[in-house]
Image (spheres, helix red, strand yellow):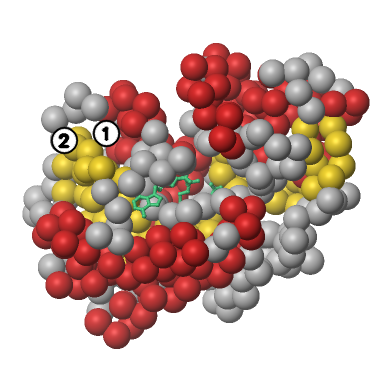
Amino acid sequence: MNTLPRILVTGGAGFIGSHYVRTLLGPQGNPCAAVTVLDKLTYAGHLANLHTVRDDPRYSFVHGDICDAPLVDALVAEHDQIVHFAAESHVDRSIAEAADFIRTNVSGTQTLLAAALRHGLETFVHISTDEVYGSIAAGSWPETHPVAPNSPYAAAKASSDLIALAHHRTHHLDVRVTRCSNNYGPHQFPEKIIPLFVTRLLNGGRVPLYGDGGNIRDWLHVDDHVRGIELVRTRGRAGEIYNIGGGTELTNRELTGLLLEACGADWSRADFVEDRKGHDRRYSVDCGKLTAELGYRPRKDFAEGLAETVAWYREHRAWWEPLLRPAVGADRPLALTT
Ligand code: NAD
């Protein structure tokens, strides 16, 4: 490539997408000519997440839907690469009603891929999740492990992965898929376990823990995730899947203990509630491929990252308080994991 890429970022107003955009346009970002965010601004998308980049001449924002084929076609025609974050991302919402998950995660991805093909896009980075592999009692999944998703969210993501990879196999489109573990960090919507629990505790409330609290997740700081994505975008190989993990496995019970402590609370503020339907017991990705090929290693110490995240929520009430009413009104948690 001789010129700097023009990058279309879908879902760039959400938690991870906005961190990606802020990083890319920040002092440590890889060079690029333009970054356009395409985002529908669902309940999970917020322009406030992009406030710090809004005056950057390389940045522009388009309010729109990835399922809007004419809009997507016009945008893709003006870009060289896509980094595709846009999705319905919340497992519990997918259990309550899956239609939007199929529409956005599956049809929306297909709309982007079709436009990418028409316009001879250089690179399409598809952001996926470890949840597509299912649940694993021991050991870790390599990228060659077949997908066996359990929740409607994971099934929709797995479907989009397969459609994306089929565009490489069939049409030789340069598609690269990343599958990461549970992200944490600032700007995460307060429906996922860390921001949900922290905001409730900071408000003097109680926290609901699913089942026996023994479900295990690997935690990845959003900074490390974004670094992994950039390695894949700039140096990864077409048609390949790359797992991205954080290296910190915790049961939800252990995580809850840490969050209670960080917020100056004790177990009297926690309730064990009826388990999520079909709740996956454990996720664990093997990141050996990304390490061996591209030198990836998570850098953020979990204790440090968690303390910074809790401090961020403590200091940014103006960001999350307006979001609480629709998300966290009921006794039942909307989600404990992604
Ligand atoms: P998020 O819910 O915070 O943000 C999703 C963004 O997509 C929002 O800005 C929303 O407005 C936008 N969006 C939704 N539907 C859209 C549509 N039809 N058209 C355009 N924009 C639309 O999600 P997140 O946590 O930042 O996750 C980003 C990606 O990473 C998702 O693909 C998700 O599956 C994946 N992922 C997330 C995690 C995690 O821990 N959060 C873990 C693994 C993978």
Q: Are circles 2 and 1 on residues that touch, CB within 8 Å?
A: yes
Q: Residue furthest right?
A: 268
- The quadrant in which residue 193 appears is top right
| Residue 202 image offset from top left, x and y in percent | 69, 19
Q: Is residue 76 visible?
A: no
Circle 1 — which element?
A: loop
Residue at (49%, 31%) from the top-left corner? 187
In which quadrant is the N terminus drawn? bottom left
Instruction: Name the residue tied to disc 2.
Output: 58
Q: Is mark 2 within 8 Å of ligand 1?
A: no
Q: What is the number of callouts on the image?
A: 2
Question: Which one is earlier in the sequence, the residue at label 2 or at label 1?
Answer: 1
In the image, which disc is placed on residue 25? 1
Name the residue at the bottom extreme.
170
Identity of the residue drawn at 88% across and 50% down: 212
Quarter-of-image position of residue 130? bottom right
Distance from Cα at disc 2 to Cα at disc 1: 8 Å
Tag 2, which secondary structure?
Answer: loop
